[in-house]
Image (tube, grey):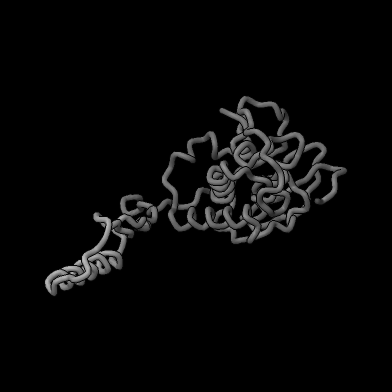
Amino acid sequence: MTYRSSGACYCAALSLAGLLLSAGGAAAIAARGSSVNSNAIQSPAFLPSTIETANIAPIEPAPVGSTLAPDPSPNLEVAPAPRPAAGLLGGMKISVALENLASETSCLAEAMYYEARGQGLPGEKAVAEVVVHRMNHVSYPHSICGVVHQGSRSSCQFSFVCDGTLNRPRTAGAWNRAMRLAAQIIEGSLPLTNITAGAISFHAARLAAPNWRGMVRTVTIGNNVFYRRAGRGTS
């Protein structure tokens, strides 16, 4: 801080009282200059979001009996999300626009939660692979949410989307696990390794094999049997 003198010159002799006053003023100025700036930006306290589960009774997993058949009519009523720019996030050919990251993660978690919860990591990853394979197939929407929520009414590709299941309370532990796995798969820290050999469809193992023309059975993982199109590679 700089101060200017108010006169053209100083007197040659100063009184003792003036010296003491000047010294006291300088000390006050120095003390003020060394104080903490009260206008400094303070870091806000982090308040993590919480999941309220105290009043929600856990539900038993629904019986596994869903079937994800080949889509007989790719052009259904639900319009897919625009294809995101490629290469933003890694994984097994997974491209997710950053502005859609939260919704895409939630949609992938829904597929694993409702189709493979309780089946262990291989079963959950197998369902995730079907979603990703479809996302990268020309006949299906080019986003995770577009694939999972494709169709309407009785033509939903995933039955849990249209049968009211999404409106029921979720088991907190299983849902948190599905969300964590979905985030790790999308970011690439838990890569998909094509354990389904290119599958784009599946059905519950306890059901009779459906008559899916042009489809080849690949593998059974968990409680589901997986299929890919005939004549296509396993990638």
Q: Is residue 58 visible?
A: yes
Say how many tags the image has.
0
**In the picture, residue 36 is in which quadrant?**
bottom left
Q: Residue furthest front?
A: 12
User: Which residue is painted at 72% across and 37% down in the image?
Assistant: 70
Q: Is residue 205 visible?
A: no
Q: Residue furthest right?
A: 231
Percent across and percent down for residue 171 are 44, 53
Percent across and percent down for residue 169 are 41, 46
- Left or right, 95 with reference to 63: right
Q: Compared to 105, does 119 lie above or below?
A: below
Front residue of this view, candidates 120 and 83: 83
**In the picture, residue 200 is in which quadrant?**
top right
User: Which residue is painted at 48% across and 56% down in the image?
Assistant: 176
- Left or right, 37 with reference to 222: left
Q: Residue furthest left?
A: 17
Q: Compared to 93, does 31 lie above or below?
A: below
